[in-house]
Image (spheres, rainbow, N blue to C red):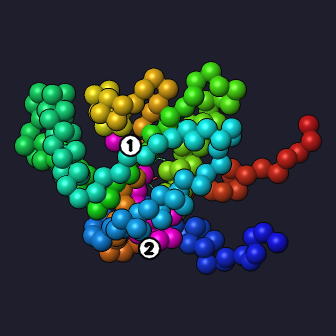
Amino acid sequence: MYPEQPLPEALERLSSRRSVKAIDLQEPGPDAPALDAILDAALRVPDHGKLGPWRLVTFSGPARAEFGRILATRWQALNAHANDAQVLFEQNRLLRAPVVVAVISARQPDHKIPEWEQILSAGAVCQNLLIAANLAGFAAQWLTEWYAYDAYIQSLFDVGESEDIAGFIYIGSAASKPSERPRPENQSRIQRWQQR
Ligand SMILES: Cc1cc2nc3c(=O)[nH]c(=O)nc-3n(C[C@H](O)[C@H](O)[C@H](O)COP(=O)(O)O)c2cc1C
């Protein structure tokens, strides 16, 4: 039999999972072995054609501040009137969490597997990262913000024509769980198929 048994606790955790705002994340984050376990779990996504249409870039320790300095410089180049507080915010952006994982959707264009399906697989990696982090005891948030869409920042990740930054997954610990947010009424989004 597969799976051997139901895991009601995991289902309950999934059913009540909340993202925690990056600004509310704190130490500790996953150490290297814990992060490896989260990444290994997250990359077990459905992948039509076995293309592996995604790649990851991880940030921890001083890499976060280094990248923050790049963000701050770019922000100043884009915003001539950027004030000190904004520049400082950019410098500290990745320092909001102990670990940040950039997920890049890396498609093979003109492949018989439609690009849309390859994009969906990268989205699945992002969601799996949120779930794996949660099951490993960490809180997380999926963000794109401005820098996921900025051509210069993308160039630093060697984002090619058939690539996009699907998101930055911020991972850390949270002092408390956020209260529930408004959500679509599930039943309004679920229909039973009716023959036409
Ligand atoms: C692709 C994607 C990009 C997102 N980017 C942002 C963002 O840039 N800023 C933001 O405040 N929330 C962003 N969010 C929303 C949050 O990650 C998250 O959905 C929200 O905080 C509530 O999520 P929850 O239902 O998991 O608690 C993004 C969500 C997705 C799916």
Q: Position of residue 114 (x, y in %)?
A: 66, 29
Going 23% across and 59% down the picture, which residue do you hit? 61
Q: Are marks 2 and 1 in contact (CB under 8 Å)?
A: no
Q: Which one is nearer the viewer's eye here, 94 or 83?
A: 94
Q: Position of residue 108 (x, y in %)?
A: 57, 28
Q: Quadrant of residue 117?
A: top right
Mark 2 belongs to which amino acid? Answer: Gly
Left or right: where 116 falls relative to 167: right
Q: Position of residue 118 (x, y in %)?
A: 60, 36
In the rendered structure, which disc, 2 or 1, sits on the residue that comes first in sequence?
A: 2
Q: Which one is nearer the viewer's eye here, 79 or 26?
A: 26
Going 28% across and 62% down the picture, which residue do you hit? 98
Q: Is mark 1 within 8 Å of ligand 1?
A: yes
Q: Which one is nearer the viewer's eye here, 64 or 24?
A: 64
Going 91% across and 37% down the picture, which residue do you hit? 196
- Residue pointed to by mark 1: 144
Q: Is mark 2 within 8 Å of ligand 1?
A: no
Say above or below: 88 vs 134.
above
- For the residues marked 2 and 1, what is the alpha-carbon distance in whole angstroms? 23 Å
Q: Secondary structure at mark 2?
A: loop
- Residue pointed to by mark 2: 137
Q: Which one is nearer the viewer's eye here, 105 or 180?
A: 105
- Magenta part of the protein: which range? 132-145
Q: Position of residue 177 (x, y in %)?
A: 41, 72
Say above or below: 34 vs 190.
below
Left or right: where 150 falls relative to 33: left
Tell me if residue 7 can be seen.
yes
Q: Kindly give the residue lying farthest to the right in the view shown.
A: 195
Mark 1 belongs to which amino acid? Answer: Thr
Say above or below: 117 vs 31.
above
Asked if the magenta segment contains residue 100, the reply would be: no
